[in-house]
Image (cartoon, rainbow, N blue to C red):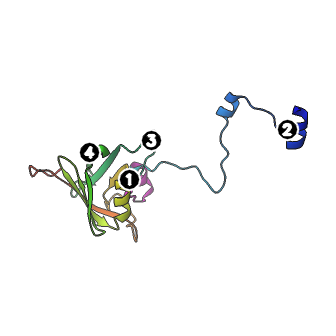
């Protein structure tokens, strides 16, 4: 019976489980391997990415917000956990308000609708402010984050 089946459907050498597990999946030209987007790698390439997603083994639990101290190349920011994000508010396409129990984060920029939608779906792991000394090319018709400000009830900023 096995010989008839192999004759009709064509015989292929059988691989063991460990051989199949160790085999590399074939890459097709239409789907190149995806590289994670990391904010630090973009500084070297000169391409500004206002936000992105770095794959991990869990659902997006954290998001890093990075801005620059006025007049310097010194980054500052915070990492928040999505479970504490209570509300994503917006004013037009130029301002987002992330409401947390102890603070409100205001993100100002241009064309922020896609960022708002992805933040609401926990699909963003970093957001970074544009800094002209870091990125040579100014984004033309793309999303740009011009300012990130953290406001706290006691009046402290950041």
Q: Nearer the viewer, residue 117 or 41?
A: 117
- Within-10-Å neighbours for mark 1: few <14, some 14–19, many 20+: few
Q: Residue at x 34, y 57 (%)?
A: 134
- Mark 2–mark 3 distance (CA, rounded to whole Å): 39 Å
Position of residue 133 measured from the top left corner of the image (x, y, whole percent): 32, 60
Label drawn at residue 84: 4
The mark nearer the N terminus, 2 or 4, is 2
Q: Is the Cβ of the residue at disc 2 closer than 8 Å to that at disc 4?
A: no
The residue identified by callout 3 is 56
Q: Secondary structure at mark 2?
A: loop
Q: Which residues are magenta?
A: 40-51
The residue identified by callout 1 is 121
The mark nearer the N terminus, 2 or 3, is 2
Of circles 4 and 3, the one toward us is 4
- Mark 2–mark 4 distance (CA, rounded to whole Å): 56 Å
One can see residue 126 in this view: yes
The mark nearer the N terminus, 4 or 1, is 4
């Amino acid at each position: 019976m096995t010989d008839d089946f192999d004759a009709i459907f064509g015989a292929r050498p059988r691989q063991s489980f460990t051989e199949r597990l160790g085999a590399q999946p074939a890459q097709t030209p239409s789907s190149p391997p995806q590289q994670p987007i990391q904010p630090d790698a973009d500084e070297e390439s000169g391409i500004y990415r206002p936000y992105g997603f770095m794959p991990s083994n869990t659902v997006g639990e954290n998001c890093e917000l990075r801005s620059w101290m006025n007049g310097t190349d010194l980054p500052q920011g915070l990492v928040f956990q999505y479970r504490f994000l209570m509300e994503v508010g917006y004013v037009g396409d130029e301002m987002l308000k992330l409401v947390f129990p102890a603070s409100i984060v205001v993100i100002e920029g241009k064309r922020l609708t896609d960022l708002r939608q992805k933040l609401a779906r926990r699909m963003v792991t970093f957001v970074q402010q544009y800094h002209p000394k870091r990125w040579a090319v100014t984004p033309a018709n793309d999303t740009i984050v011009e300012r990130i400000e953290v406001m706290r009830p006691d009046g402290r900023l950041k």
